[in-house]
């Protein structure tokens, strides 16, 4: 499956791009509306992009009353990305989304580098949300965790059905002349090509640690990139920064990935998932 990475596509502004995906993932929604951080909020750098959007969103009421019905008209399965500042926020948002038939899964954003973090651990946030929804729950983790496989195992034990790997990693860009931070928020989340090896490592390690379904994201721009994420252990991939420069990326990456499969005699993503881990041990009977 090809998804967009949360926050990297406005499906209501670009419905034709969203319809080229297998799943549309919303921008992270929070309990209250947020205006986001002060400008400048985007800075290009040599090998990637810095953003400090700060979770600008209409809040859960705005999503449920206005956006969700319009997003459902796209005819693409919807995942809602959920964020908050305490475990109770995640629990409440999941409860509100649980009885909305338009929502096929919930992605818990446990890792935005641009806002203050909830004091609870990722596993505690998942544990708070889990009993409040029967929908599929993906936990989106930061590549900056001290021991990412351990965090992945902990969110699995807390009830996550899958992992999204990875969110952006904190970065800084300075103005050439003034040497002051280029972003209004000073630090931002770093995404794009430079994130790919970091994200691949995260997918590789967490596949081994958990065996959970993984949405791989981080610098994917081509079918070859997508193939590498599948080989590392992802079962789906999400396109982020590439969508800003190439809105046709979903269709193009899908075609390129099909070519990669054909060249290797693979028939489906399931055949590619985990290939980097070598041949599976024979089952002992
Ligand atoms: C402008 C921008 C906004 C983002 N907003 C969100 C967000 O609201 N929630 C979230 O979980 N991730 C957000 N992300 C992170 C992406 O979903 C993705 O994890 C990250 O950019 C890595 O993928 P990429 O290198 O392909 O962009 C955002 C990224 C960018 C560039």
Image: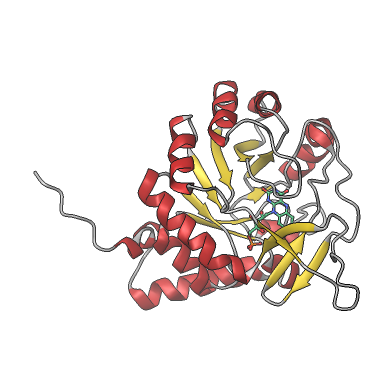
Say which residue appears at 57% left-offset and 70% top-offset: 253
Where is 273 relative to 160, above or below?
A: below
- Residue 270 left/right relative to 187: left
| Residue 170: quadrant of the picture | bottom right
| Residue 39: quadrant of the picture | bottom right
User: Percent position (x, y) of residue 275?
Assistant: 33, 63
Q: Is residue 59 visible?
A: yes
Where is 180 relative to 127, above or below?
A: below
Q: Is residue 211 visible?
A: no
- Residue 240 left/right relative to 10: left
Say which residue appears at 82% left-offset and 63% top-offset: 42
User: Percent position (x, y) of residue 9?
Assistant: 74, 57
Where is 176 relative to 5, above or below?
A: below
- How many labels were placed on the picture? 0
| Residue 166: quadrant of the picture | bottom right
Viewer-side residue, 61 vs 32: 32
What is the residue that sits farthest to the left in this orientation? 285
User: Percent position (x, y) of residue 77?
Assistant: 62, 45
User: Percent position (x, y) of residue 70?
Assistant: 79, 42
Viewer-side residue, 177 vs 153: 177
- Residue 17 left/right relative to 35: left
Looking at the picture, the colour scheme in use is secondary structure
Say which residue appears at 15% left-offset and 49% top-offset: 283
Say which residue appears at 70% left-offset and 49% top-offset: 113
Viewport quadrant of the C terminus: top left
* Quadrant of the image where one finds ligand 1: bottom right
- Residue 190 left/right relative to 161: right
What is the residue that sits farthest to the top in this orientation? 131
């Amino acid at each position: 499956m090809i998804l967009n990475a949360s926050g990297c596509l406005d499906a209501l502004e670009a419905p034709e791009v969203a319809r080229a995906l297998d799943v549309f993932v919303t921008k992270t929604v929070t309990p209250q509306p947020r205006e986001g951080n002060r400008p400048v909020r985007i800075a290009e750098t040599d090998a990637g992009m810095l953003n400090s959007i700060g979770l600008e969103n209409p809040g859960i009421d705005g999503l449920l009353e206005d956006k969700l019905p319009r997003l459902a008209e796209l005819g693409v399965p919807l995942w809602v990305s959920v964020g908050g500042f305490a475990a109770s926020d995640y629990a409440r948002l999941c409860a509100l989304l649980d009885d909305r038939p338009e929502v096929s899964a919930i992605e818990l954003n446990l890792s935005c580098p641009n806002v203050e973090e909830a004091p609870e651990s990722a596993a505690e946030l998942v544990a708070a949300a889990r009993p409040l929804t029967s929908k599929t729950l993906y936990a989106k983790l930061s590549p900056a965790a001290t021991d990412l496989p351990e965090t992945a195992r902990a969110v699995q034990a807390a009830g996550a059905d899958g992992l999204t790997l990875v969110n952006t990693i904190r970065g800084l860009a300075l103005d050439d002349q003034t040497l002051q931070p280029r972003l209004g928020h000073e630090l931002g989340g770093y995404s794009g090509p430079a994130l790919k090896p970091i994200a691949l490592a995260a997918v590789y390690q967490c596949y081994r640690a958990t065996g959970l379904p993984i949405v791989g994201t981080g610098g994917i721009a081509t079918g070859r990139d997508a193939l590498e994420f599948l080989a590392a252990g992802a079962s789906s991939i999400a396109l982020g920064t590439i969508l800003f420069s190439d809105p046709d990326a979903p269709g193009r990456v899908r075609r390129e990935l099909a070519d990669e499969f054909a060249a290797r005699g693979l028939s489906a993503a399931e055949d590619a998932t985990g290939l980097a881990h070598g041949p599976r041990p024979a089952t002992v009977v």
